[in-house]
Amino acid sequence: MKTQKRITRNEAVTILKSGKFCNVTFIKRSDDSQRSMVCRSNVKKHLKGGTAAYNFKEKELVSVYEVNKGADNGYKAVPIERIIRINGKQVVWWDLLLQSSF
């Protein structure tokens, strides 16, 4: 049986913020449903200007662009503490008490 690769919270954030395409699965804060998407960070092409209504760092969110959604509603916020899997790797939360730099 193949052993599941596990990564830490900080490794998951590093992958999300790398600007490379990734597949992420997480639990939505709004309704506790599971959500999967192919996304990447650092996409600026479809920005419409203005500032975000909230601080991503304070809310522990990472801003990503969902590639399958298109220009109108492709920007999403992924809650860091609710990531289950990223690129097929299970995320473990044993480092929750450590300070992270996201």
Image: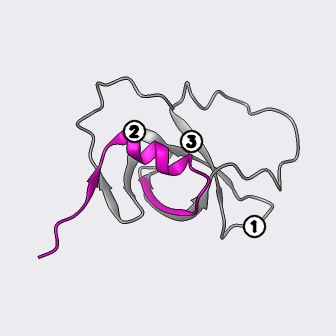
Q: Which residue is mark 2?
A: 10
Left/right of residue 67 with respect to residue 100 in the rendered view: right
Write the residue at 22% across / 64% down: 4
Q: Which comes sooner in the sequence, label 3 or label 1?
A: 3
Q: Residue furthest bottom?
A: 1
Labels 2 & 1 near each other (Cβ < 8 A): no
Write the residue at 61% across / 57% down: 40
Left/right of residue 8 with respect to residue 57 in the rendered view: left
Q: Amino acid at mark 3?
A: Val
Q: Residues within 10 Å of mark 2 (few under 14, many from 20)?
A: some
Which quarter shows the N terminus? bottom left
Task: Indicate the position of residue 63 as horizontal and vertical percent values.
Answer: 62, 44
Image depth: mark 2 or mark 1 in front = 2
Image depth: mark 3 or mark 1 in front = 3
In the rendered structure, does residue 13 fall within the stretch colored magenta? yes
Q: Secondary structure at mark 3?
A: strand
Q: Which comes sooner in the sequence, label 2 or label 1?
A: 2
Please tell me which residue lies in front, 93 or 21: 21
Task: Indicate the position of residue 69 as horizontal and vertical percent values.
Answer: 69, 67
Left/right of residue 49 with respect to residue 80 in the rendered view: right
Q: Which residue is mark 3?
A: 62
Q: Which residue is mark 1?
A: 70
Per the rendered image, the range of residues in magenta is: 1-26
Q: Secondary structure at mark 2?
A: helix
